[in-house]
Amino acid sequence: MKKTIDDIGVRGQRVLVRLDLNVPLEEIGRIADDRRIRSTLPTLKHLLDDGGRLILMSHLGRPLDKAKDRAKYSLRPVASRLSELLGRPVRMLDDCVGPAVENAVASMKDSQVCLLENLRFHEAETIKDKKAANDPALRERKDSFARQLATLADVYVNDAFGTCHRDNASMLTVPELLNGRPCVVGYLVQKELKFLGDAVTKPARPFVCLLGGAKVSDKLGAIRNLLTRCDTVMVGGAMAYTFLAAEGMSVGGSLVEPDLFDVARDLRRKGESKLKLPIDSVVADEIAPGASTQVCESRIPVDRIGLDIGPRTIDTYRDVIQNAGTILWNGPMGVFETPPFDGGTLAMARALAEATDRGAVTIVGGGDTAAAVDRAGVADRMTHVSTGGGASLEFLEGKVLPGIAALDDAEREVRP
Ligand code: AMP
């Protein structure tokens, strides 16, 4: 367990808060969806009520050419929206480090808020530790950037779960440098660790996992780890065709990863009856809205592509979900962005919602899967929708998330 903002007092302290304000933008300056901003409010309100001086930081998009991308990836519109939501001014700074930022922070009063400009305007933010290990100049660039951020902080709060699997300067190097000063998690990260952690370590059984999406390679580690912990792992999406093709089934033009056939066979052997594959597919000759479809139960013709799980698979997977105590879902069952290939994904979203209603724990992870439960209108009927796709997968693989490892451990309760 990690220390949280409830374990510390922040009155009069400069609180450096790493958030994930990486919102989708429609065009320059217009936020398409402000959910990520709204989700930070409980942590920010708590710290403000407690009298902290909040210095907020985040990345936004992937600015490549600093000069050209400055307007496109500025966090300024986020500051305006956050200010509306908090009902108080949020001062936008022009950079995230440097003398002007240090002066602005030095003049802050209790319960005031400022937002630093996009961390990724500095390449040092994303230098990987592995690369820096063989290059002292790179190491120094990353450390020097992190030192400048660290000078702004008496207290460090990480509430950016979606970035916790990255060894970014603001996520890992800053808390490492803040030796002795509190480094804790905010409410969003606390919630993620609780739900994902409980699912993996003490799930209500049967513990069932539904995995989909495009590639087996992305989810190999998670499948391996989950097979040792789950009672059933159900596979859908294009991933399923790599397993099916590895067993000799003709899958037509479906997306497969032939270099993983051996691994797929091995997983199937080890998973034995736990690992379930689709027994039918919705196929078409192209991915196009309204394309005409067929259902294939065995081989898929060479001129057809498997694009969704079929009706019998939906029934079988739904039965398993109906009897489960915990259901963890990552990755769509088909090309759900393009109807009519959304049927399987939407049916699974509804099945999970019904499972929650009857008392099961349902956890959804990954951007696509979160979007799918949203589209099915059942997002608020899930026990937990994880904000981090990559981070939640790495957590489920059993990996230590660097951004979490760097934070203070909670003191253990000492029982007499
Ligand atoms: P991932 O990022 O690995 O979770 O993959 C999500 C993507 O997988 C979505 O964009 C889906 O359209 C895609 N996908 C799911 N099923 C299939 C399929 N049968 N064929 C091609 N793409 C698929």
Image (cartoon, rainbow, N blue to C red):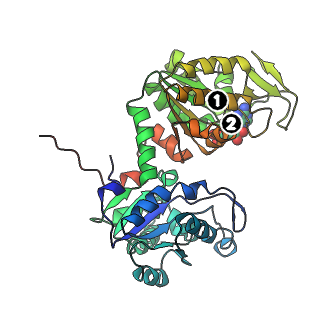
Q: Which residue is labeled 1 in the image? A: 350
Question: What x and y, as percent, mark residue 40?
Answer: 50, 57
Q: Amino acid at mark 1?
A: Arg
Asked if the residue at tag 1 contacts the one at tag 2, i.e. Cβ–Cβ closer than 8 Å, the answer is yes
Q: Secondary structure at mark 2?
A: loop
Q: Is residue 404 above or below residue 343?
A: below
- Earlier in the chain: of badge 2 and badge 1, it is 1
Q: Quadrant of ligand 1?
A: top right
Q: Is residue 356 left or right of residue 261?
A: left
Mark seen at residue 376? 2
Q: Amino acid at mark 2?
A: Ala
Q: Secondary structure at mark 1?
A: helix
Q: Residue at x 29, y 66 (%)?
A: 181
Question: What x and y, as percent, mark residue 82?
Answer: 56, 65
Q: Local crowd at mark 2 within 10 Å, few (<14), some, or many (≥20)?
A: some
Q: Is residue 196 left or right of residue 309?
A: left
Which residue of the protein is positioned furthest toward the left in this rendering?
416
Q: Would you say residue 118 is visible in this rendering?
A: yes
Question: What x and y, as percent, mark residue 44?
Answer: 45, 62
Q: Residue at x 64, y 29 (%)?
A: 350
- Nearest the viewer among 134 and 375 is 375
Q: Residue at x 55, y 71 (%)?
A: 122
Q: Is residue 151 left or right of residue 279?
A: left
Quarter containing the C terminus? top left
Q: CA distance from mark 2 to mark 1?
A: 7 Å
Q: Local crowd at mark 1 within 10 Å, few (<14), some, or many (≥20)?
A: many
Mark seen at residue 332? none
Q: Quadrant of residue 134?
A: bottom left
Q: Would you say residue 407 is visible in this rendering?
A: no
Question: What x and y, as percent, mark residue 136?
Answer: 43, 68
